[in-house]
Amino acid sequence: MMDKPYVTVGEIAEHLGCQVLGDKSEKIFEISLYHDSNENSLTYVPYGKIDLIPEICAGAILTRISVGLPLHRNYIISKYDPHEMLADVIAFLIEKGLYCCDVSVKPMLSDSSEIAENVSVQNGAVIGDHTVLSSGVYVGKNARIGNNCVIGANTVIGDNCTIGDNVKIGTCCSIGTENFEYHKFKDGWKKLPAVGKVSIGNYVQIGGNVVVEKGTIGTTEIGDFTQIENLVQIGHEAKIGVQCHIVALTAIAGWAEIGNYVDIYGQSAVSNHVKVGDHTVLFARSGVDKDIDHNMIISGFPAQNHHNELKYQAFLRKLFRKSIKKR
């Protein structure tokens, strides 16, 4: 770790125009989500999560709060919402070389893999045994594809993506595409640069034209044995559990968390930062804008308990019939 590029807490604070509470000389090697942080990382803590600060293991924490903080941490104290400063922080870390993706190691291709003639595999990539890369596939720098995988024609696997064993990905997919995370300021929208990754587990099946965004500062994750049909969008930092079943035209926004054994049927949408519990079913066209507990059957927009949604629809039909009779 010590041979990697780093910046100090003081350098970050000076760049942002912020105060430091703690050791300015503390070395920072990366930025991470608060629940994935370590002693060498910088993390930011939204106002709604400040109660988690005592449990966070990070080299430094970017926060707006300066009262009652545990003194054994290093803090960069912002006058504004820390999320507003993320774009500047990430850009600064990239400028300082912390996320340089210049790889000189040639790709490692298993002798038993099947690679079509017009496939492009970048330096640092590793392709496992008996894996098939179809025509037009692009594999980015430092990507890892496991054993017995099939990657469909014209699919792009982005830099630093990790794909497990026995994974099938359809045609024209984009795994690890650029994130779509913006923050709105008074003078307009500002995009947050992405330095995160995508991690796909074992025995995952993904249909055609599926898009999985790489994380902004964390990892977008898809769990083992999950099945994703065609035309599904999965946002940055979203986490999909094991053995989920996600049907076509579903959109899962950034930072959303889908539990294990969840069924999501066609044209459903899950808002950002929303959590869906284990063994939950979202019927077609569900619009989930708040957390859903475990073992629920959900439908409608805004999504609610399916039984309540049926009663609501029956009530609306009854009102409609009464209004027609009055006319």
Image (spheres, rainbow, N blue to C red):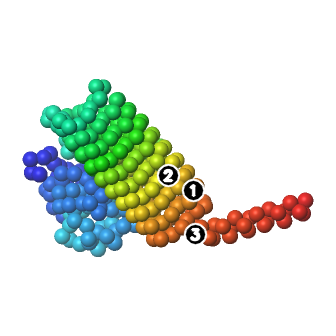
Residue at the image point whose x is 18% and y is 51% from the top: 29
Which residue type does callout 1 highlight? Ala
The circle on residue 305 is 3
Quadrant for residue 306, please give it: bottom right
Residue at the image point whose x is 26% and y is 32% from the top: 115
Looking at the image, tell me whether mark 3 or mark 1 is earlier in sequence order.
1
Quadrant for residue 260, please give it: bottom left
Q: In whole angstroms, how far apart are the C-alphas of marks 2 and 1?
A: 9 Å
Can residue 209 be spotted in the picture? yes
Q: Which residue is mark 2?
A: 247
324 in relation to 72, above or below: above
Q: Residues within 10 Å of mark 1 (few under 14, many from 20)?
A: some
Q: Which x, y percent locates residue 173?
A: 40, 39
Left or right of 215? Residue 256 is right
Determine whether label 2 and label 1 are within 8 Å by CB: yes
Q: Residue furthest left?
A: 3
Left or right of 57? Residue 291 is right
Q: Which x, y percent locates residue 7?
A: 17, 49
Left or right of 38? Residue 299 is right
What element does badge 1 sit on? loop
Q: In whole angstroms, how far apart are the C-alphas of marks 3 and 1?
A: 13 Å
Q: Which residue is mark 1?
A: 284
Q: Nearer the viewer, residue 96 or 217?
A: 217
Between label 3 and label 2, give the one nearer the viewer.
2
What element does badge 3 sit on? strand
